[in-house]
Amino acid sequence: VRRDAAEKRAQLAPLRKAMQSAEKTVEALHAEIARIDAALADPALFAKDAAKAKTLTIERGRKAKELGAAEEAWLAATKAFETAEAAG
């Protein structure tokens, strides 16, 4: 019984790691977007440095796309982990 449990944990380890890694990526992207949003919330930015405002706006769009992909990866990794966990 203990051996079976150890084998099960070993089989789940890569799936758990993928799920946790994907979650960390999502959290990091949320933080980056929040940082950009904070900078863009300053109305003086657009008056003082329109080029920087434009760059930040473009960067935010890229990060939002990355976040969407990262969330999908996280959901897929979570589903794979939960499916494998339930199967054994």
Image (tube, grey):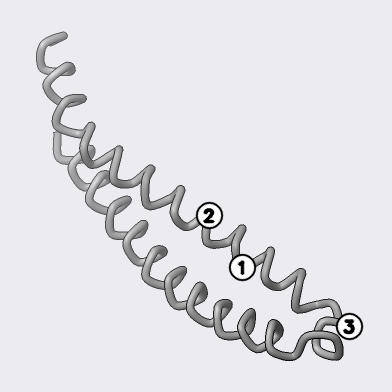
Residue 45 in the image: above or below residue 87: below
Q: Which label was assigned to residue 14?
A: none
Nearer-N-terminus badge (3/1): 1
Which quadrant of the figure contains the C terminus? top left
Residue placed under numbered mark 2 in the picture: 28
The Cα atoms of the two marked residues, 3 and 1, are separated by 19 Å
Q: Position of residue 16 (x, y in %)?
A: 29, 38
- The vertical placement of 19 against 26, above or below, is above
- Between disc 2 and disc 3, whose residue precedes? 2
When asked about the image quadrant of residue 12, the answer is top left
Query: The disc labelled 3 sits on which kind of residue?
Result: Ala
What is the secondary structure assignment of the residue under circle 3? helix
Q: Residue at x 87, y 84 (%)?
A: 43
Q: Residue 68: name its quadrant.
A: bottom left
Q: Which of 73/40 is in front?
A: 40
Q: On the picture, is 27 further left or further right than 80?
A: right
Q: Along the polypeptide, which appears first: circle 1 or circle 2?
A: 2
Q: Which residue is mark 1?
A: 33
Q: Which mark is residue 44?
A: 3
User: Disc 3 or disc 1, which is closer to the eye?
Assistant: 3
**Residue 19 in the image: above or below residue 62:** above
Q: Residue at x 61, y 58 (%)?
A: 31
